[in-house]
Amino acid sequence: MASDMSLEQEGQLVGAKIRTMRLARRMTQSQLARPDFSISYISAIERGQIQPSLRALAILASRLGLPSTEPLTSATTEDTANDFLLRGSRHLDEVVELDFLEAQAAIQQGAIQEAIESLKQLATKNLRQQQQERLHYSLGRAYQQIRQFEEGKDHLLKAAQLAQDCGDNYISILVYSLLGSGYTATHNYEDATASYQRCLQLLTSSQFPSPLLMAQVYSSLGENYLRLNQYDRANEMLQRAAMEAAELATTEQRQEVYSEQCRYFTAAGQYYPANLYLNKYLYLDDQRSRLRLRSELYHYLCHAVMRKDQERAYSYLEAAYQREKDGEDQLTAASIAMHLGAWFLAHDSLTEAESYAKKALKRAQHFGDTIIAAETLLLLGQIAYALSHLKDGDRYFVAGLEMLERLRKREELAEELVHYAQLLESHGRIGEALAYFKRAYEVRE
């Protein structure tokens, strides 16, 4: 009997260790399993229901990056560092924490259905109220990623109510931010704006207002006001977004803020927000991502300026271009050059329009797929058609539309598909125009 208990405890220890190390490496169960094992086999091992053979242990150790001299059955320094996770196989709350981490890892890996199934299993357990709010938030996030917006909205609204009951501002902030993006994706801009405004209120009163999230929320509000043709409000929000982004002065300062937030939530035993702030800390290591955020904020700000006052727009854009063209942030310079190209196109100065658009593309193409590069390609398509260079125009339009699709910018994609279809129709290419009109309808649906 004692021997059986020892084997059972060893099985739990091995399973918990495999699971901990898999999550630390952001691997899903399917990634760890292939091609030798099934997902259900890995799941059973991690839950201590079966004991793997020595051959299976060797394969799993190799995939987890362990040296052959460090068997999974032995205690290591990683066991000590993750002691609270190892104990999770014997305590419900910590088992639930592991389940949440697994679902989060699956979402980050794009294994959305796997995450949803894992979260649905969690729903059958006796969860505390705070765990229930996290469950509904995670399900809402997962459903939104696969564009099942109604299911996502239902879960997010439940999470918002639970978070309000618990006084959990942090989850409320995340929930209203996600609700805003979901409403925007379904063209419900009034509710999207209301959700972002609620998110902004919570952020402003938060103990740790995130400058990065503030910038993103202001930017999203600006985009929605643009769609509602409220240009003054859009300009105000985008200016605020740029100011928030400017507050993030250096990598070291930003990382220090997120490090403090991570330590605060860890000390409070709130591991979920602590983990999210850790991810933000790591995010700031990516210089290109930081520049892209600033560039996209300026991009939408230029949109607002162009729509509000065409005459003043040129002076603003030209001054901004002179300031940015030789700086480090070449993606912002690309955005401003693109808008200058659009200004010259609107004023029938095609040579200047093409010159600026090509300067914009040259700068933007080093950053891969961005909304700035996509819109530059589409602008070059318009200019080429205005110059009667139809083959070049088709090439630019197709490249820009494909980039918008890769970026999952469905609202912009639908609008540009219609614009291209109208151009094709005006040139007598009726069959091609119908195909693009049909594609625009499908994207909107």
Image (cartoon, rainbow, N blue to C red):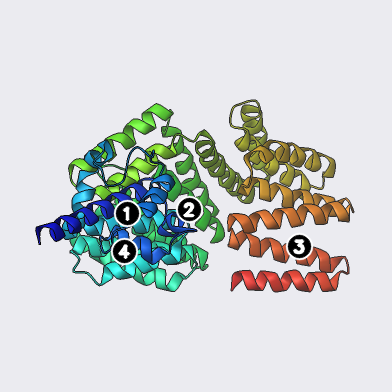
Residue 253 drawn above or below residue 221: above
Of mark 3 and mark 2, the one earlier in the sequence is: 2
Of mark 2 and mark 4, the one earlier in the sequence is: 4
Q: CA distance from mark 1 to mark 3?
A: 44 Å
Q: How many numbered markers are drawn?
A: 4
Of mark 1 and mark 3, the one earlier in the sequence is: 1
Secondary element at tag 4: helix
Q: Amino acid at mark 2?
A: Ser
Q: CA distance from mark 2 to mark 4?
A: 43 Å
Q: Which mark is residue 220?
A: 2
Of mark 1 and mark 4, the one earlier in the sequence is: 4
Q: Nearer the viewer, residue 268 or 294?
A: 268
Q: Which residue is mark 4?
A: 44
Q: Is residue 132 left or right of residue 61?
A: left
Q: CA distance from mark 1 to mark 2?
A: 28 Å
Mark 1 or 4: in front is 4
Q: CA distance from mark 4 to mark 3?
A: 53 Å
Name the residue located 48 percent from the left edge and 39 percent from the top edge: 242
Q: Amino acid at mark 1?
A: Leu
Residue 132 occupies which quadrant of the picture? bottom left
Q: Which mark is residue 101?
A: 1
Name the residue located 59 percent from the left edge and 62 percent from the top edge: 411
Q: Nearer the viewer, residue 277 or 8?
A: 8
Q: Which residue is mark 3?
A: 420
